[in-house]
Image (cartoon, rainbow, N blue to C red):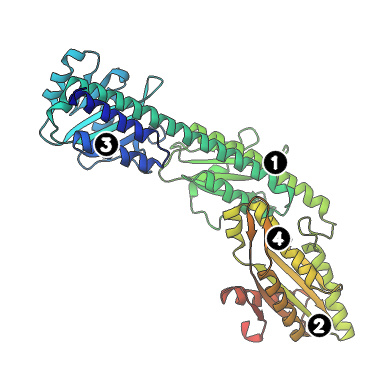
């Protein structure tokens, strides 16, 4: 076999070797660049994909619109458009469309278009005879053999292989988006299995949708008693366009998209009325049809979850236990707080309160998922129950916060109990199914009841202030309330 033939085969073998490796898209492009540096003296190599939303070519690896300081965007768009006519048989060298259909003239045409340096060569990225993007090569002077007809044919074969690999990676991206979408749908539906408090559920829904629709900012609104939309997640929204669009929602038209396509709102609703809305907004990205469909379906699932939560809350409003942990719920805590403060005042006996919060609990949910978070809550609740006396009153106050009433207990004794709880939680190995062992810590605030308190709530408010001091002071510690804290 001649050296000439070996050159072609070696080139195609190295291209194929890159395409068969599993790696990131960045590694994929860098490896191909190395091959083209070796055979074509390439200075730059890139892959660019047409973005329907932006009507621009995007870098295949980096997430920003392709703009090159040496070339105008309009010129690149023109090159992209010129390959649409006969994509499977054409490429562009220095602005000239060349083809493989006339092999006899291929070598001469290529040589005539060559420059001594800064040559720009474009091949189409093709799927089902449609051009979806460009493969770009920038190179200088090359050896004579590379300009031969046979090598140019092998270059075209290599470009076709790269095109097919890029399409596969794009399809894999879309498949991952679909998988993520179905996971979000499933997780929103599963929320209701262990939670019914909307103050807990709505931020979780917002975070799930926000992670999925990464190109847009997500907002969740609920209607208040005056039928006005009130932002419930995140903390702020300064987009006046969203507030204007919310007024356009109705049961007959439960969504609205702005004229520029960058903002959309979808109604959270039941069969009778609109109860809230989900909004998506971006300063740069348009909502494509698929994005809008995804968000519409996610909003529908969120509506179902919210409606179930409301129904469960009504059914459980007279219940006394928290469904997840088995401790008293917040309503029962408030009832027992009134009872115990009245008893302490009447019998002149001490009463103390402990407020505790799981440190970095949001990070547990974000890193391991909400099922892991629920497992942590259950285990911490079990530790609390095991460390207390029979007549102590433990409650889940909300989210990852717990409140404990200690009847007939002096503040020094309450501090001892709090420290024992903190140490017990810290050394507990929490076995999370399918993940392994997690360890968490708690921050704790302690307060004592004073006869001059005007209402029972002051007792746990003081404990809450001490809890804030514990978290502010570094977490995983116990702080006893004193008057200097306010």
Residue denoted by label 1: 304
Label 4, on which residue?
A: 377
Q: Nearer the viewer, mark 1 or mark 4?
A: 4
**Nearer to us: label 1 or label 2:** 2
Q: Which residue lies under the disc numbered 2?
A: 409
Q: Which mark is residue 26?
A: none
Q: Earlier in the sequence, mark 1 or mark 4?
A: 1
- Mark 3 or mark 1, earlier in chain: 3
Which of the two labelled residues, at mark 3 and mark 4, occupies the earlier sequence position? 3
Question: CA gap, disc 1 to disc 2?
Answer: 46 Å
Q: Residues within 10 Å of mark 3 (few under 14, many from 20)?
A: some
Separation of marks 3 and 4 at Cα, in angstroms: 54 Å
For the C terminus, give its image quadrant: bottom right
Q: CA distance from mark 4 to mark 2?
A: 26 Å
Find out whether the residues at labels 1 and 2 contact each other: C-beta distance under 8 Å: no
Q: Determine the residue positioned at 86% across, 78% down.
A: 342
Q: Which mark is residue 35?
A: 3
Tell me residue 118's x, y (percent): 15, 36
Q: Is residue 199 visible?
A: no
With respect to residue 413, does 32 lie above or below?
above
- Is 478 rendered above or below residue 439? below
Q: Mark 3 to mark 2: distance in Å?
A: 77 Å
Q: Nearer the viewer, residue 206 or 101?
A: 101
Of labels 3 and 4, the one closer to you: 3
């Amino acid at each position: 076999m001649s050296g000439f033939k070996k050159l072609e085969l070696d080139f195609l073998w190295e291209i194929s070797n890159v395409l068969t490796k599993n790696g990131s898209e960045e590694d994929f492009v860098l490896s191909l660049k190395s091959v083209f540096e070796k055979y074509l003296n390439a200075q730059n190599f890139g892959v660019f994909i047409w973005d329907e939303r932006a009507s621009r070519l995007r870098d295949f690896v980096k997430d920003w619109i392709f703009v090159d300081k040496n070339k105008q965007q309009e010129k690149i768009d023109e090159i992209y458009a010129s390959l649409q006519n006969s994509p499977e048989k054409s490429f562009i060298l220095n602005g000239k469309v060349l083809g493989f259909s006339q092999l006899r003239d291929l070598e001469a045409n290529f040589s005539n278009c060559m420059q001594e340096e800064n040559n720009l060569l474009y091949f189409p990225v093709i799927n089902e005879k449609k051009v979806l993007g460009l493969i770009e090569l920038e190179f200088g002077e090359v050896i004579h053999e590379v300009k031969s007809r046979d090598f140019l044919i092998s270059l075209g074969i290599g470009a076709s292989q790269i095109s097919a690999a890029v399409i596969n990676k794009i399809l894999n991206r879309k498949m991952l988006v679909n998988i993520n979408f179905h996971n979000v749908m499933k997780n929103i539906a599963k929320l209701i299995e262990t939670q019914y408090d909307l103050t807990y559920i709505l931020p979780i829904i917002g975070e799930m949708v926000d992670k999925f629709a990464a190109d847009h900012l997500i907002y969740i609104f609920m209607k208040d008693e005056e039928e006005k939309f009130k932002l419930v997640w995140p903390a702020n929204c300064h987009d006046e366009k969203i507030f204007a669009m919310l007024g356009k929602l109705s049961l007959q038209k439960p969504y609205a998209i702005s004229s520029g396509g960058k903002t959309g709102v979808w109604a959270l609703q039941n069969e009778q009325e609109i109860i809230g809305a989900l909004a998506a907004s971006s300063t740069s990205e348009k909502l494509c049809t698929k994005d809008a469909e995804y968000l519409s379906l996610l909003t529908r699932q969120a509506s179902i979850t919210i409606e179930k939560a409301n129904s469960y809350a009504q059914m459980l409003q007279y219940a006394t236990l928290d469904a997840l942990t088995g401790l008293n719920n917040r309503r029962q805590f408030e009832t027992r707080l009134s009872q115990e403060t009245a008893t302490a005042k009447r019998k002149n006996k001490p009463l103390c309160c402990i407020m505790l919060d799981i440190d970095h609990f949001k990070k547990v949910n974000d890193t391991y998922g909400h099922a892991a978070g629920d497992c942590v809550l259950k285990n911490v609740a079990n530790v609390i129950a095991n460390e207390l006396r029979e007549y102590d009153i433990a409650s889940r106050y909300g989210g990852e916060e717990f409140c404990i009433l200690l009847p007939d207990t002096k503040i020094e004794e309450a501090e001892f109990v709090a420290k024992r709880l903190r140490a017990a939680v810290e050394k507990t190995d929490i076995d999370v199914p399918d993940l392994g062992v997690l360890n968490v810590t708690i921050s704790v605030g302690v307060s004592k009841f004073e006869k001059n308190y005007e209402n029972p709530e002051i007792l746990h408010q003081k404990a809450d202030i001490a809890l804030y001091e514990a978290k502010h002071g570094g977490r995983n510690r116990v702080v006893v309330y004193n008057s200097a804290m306010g």
